[in-house]
Image (spheres, grey):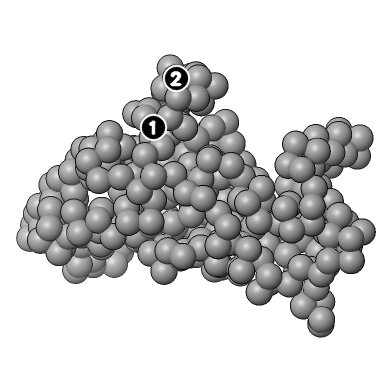
Amino acid sequence: MPKKRQAFKHNIVAIIYDFDGTLTEKPMQEYTVLPKIGIPAKKFWDTVNEETKKTKGEQIVTYMRLMLKYADNKDIAIKPADFRKLAKNIKYYPGVEKFFERINKFVDSLSNGKVELRHYIISAGLKEILNGIPFKNKFHNIFASEYHYDKYYHADFPKIIVNDTLKTQFIFRINKGREKMHESINTHMSHLDRAIPFRNMLYIGDGESDVPCMTVIKKEGGYAIAVCKKGSSKGINKAKDLLKAERVDFITRADYSKNSELEKIVKIILRNIVEGITFRKEIFKQYLTYIA
Ligand SMILES: [Mg+2]
């Protein structure tokens, strides 16, 4: 016999952000580690691409390995605290810093405090750098690639790899409420028992590496937005391709300022999600009254 469910649980909404190209114009390494070890960004990424081809390796593992190699060649030890400090050099798209709190207030007033909004980052970049971003406390959780450290706190091996397809693992972790890496996400869990249904999720990303996440979320009834840099024809064309392929619901400039087009779109989607939650809550009441 199924267990009686006495409380409606699905009143949590998640906005999930990619980081590089979504909240910032450039990859985080270009503001932080690469200037520190004194290598031009283009040279570094070209070497990563060549090395990936040559070794038939995975791109994220390759960049993490080469970053350590370059730092070591210059006798620079990069420890977690250094990564955190370097994060202060990151430049964000307009309005990013204040966006999260404003949207929280919007959902709070829209739902009379009945719906909780959570923000997440899923990034192929480095968790150690993201630990130093000034608005880190606005996020419920941040998933990103991470190094293992030896007893001297020197990075010596990749500990967690996040690439485009692995990113979807974290969507399921959020969905099932199993956000710790040691928690299995493969055991069956009924949709009613899951922490945050896909239809309560909004994914914001900027490119092809976001396609697996966008696809999973949209297929399951959630929403996706592609953002691009203002005035970038390459960016807008990428976004248009995503819209044409129905990977996203909306495309717009990466401008998180008050009353920006992006904010308006996010609010349209959140209104829809909150309305859906109210609707399903009523259905749940019927279930409790007549069936449970
Ligand atoms: Mg990106």
Q: Nearer the viewer, residue 192 or 70?
A: 70
Can residue 128 be seen in this snapshot?
no
Q: Which residue is mark 1?
A: 253
CA separation, marks 1 and 2? 12 Å
Q: Which residue is mark 2?
A: 240
Q: How many other residues sit within 10 Å of disc 2, few (<14), some (14-19) or many (≥20)?
A: some
Q: Quadrant of residue 56?
A: top right
Q: Does label 2 point to a residue whose CB lies under 8 Å from ligand 1? A: no
Name which of mark 1 and mark 2 comes first in the sequence.
2
Q: Nearer the viewer, residue 82 or 127?
A: 82
Of the residues shown, which amino acid type is indicated by label 1? Arg
Q: Which quarter of the image is occupied by the N terminus?
A: bottom left
Q: Is residue 8 above or below residue 262?
A: below
Q: Is residue 268 left or right of residue 216?
A: left
Q: Quadrant of residue 243?
A: top left
Residue 125 x, y percent position in the rendering: 63, 52
Q: How many other residues sit within 10 Å of disc 1, few (<14), some (14-19) or many (≥20)?
A: many
Q: Is residue 184 above or below residue 202?
A: below
Residue 109 x, y percent position in the rendering: 12, 58
Q: Which quarter of the image is occupied by the C terminus?
A: bottom left
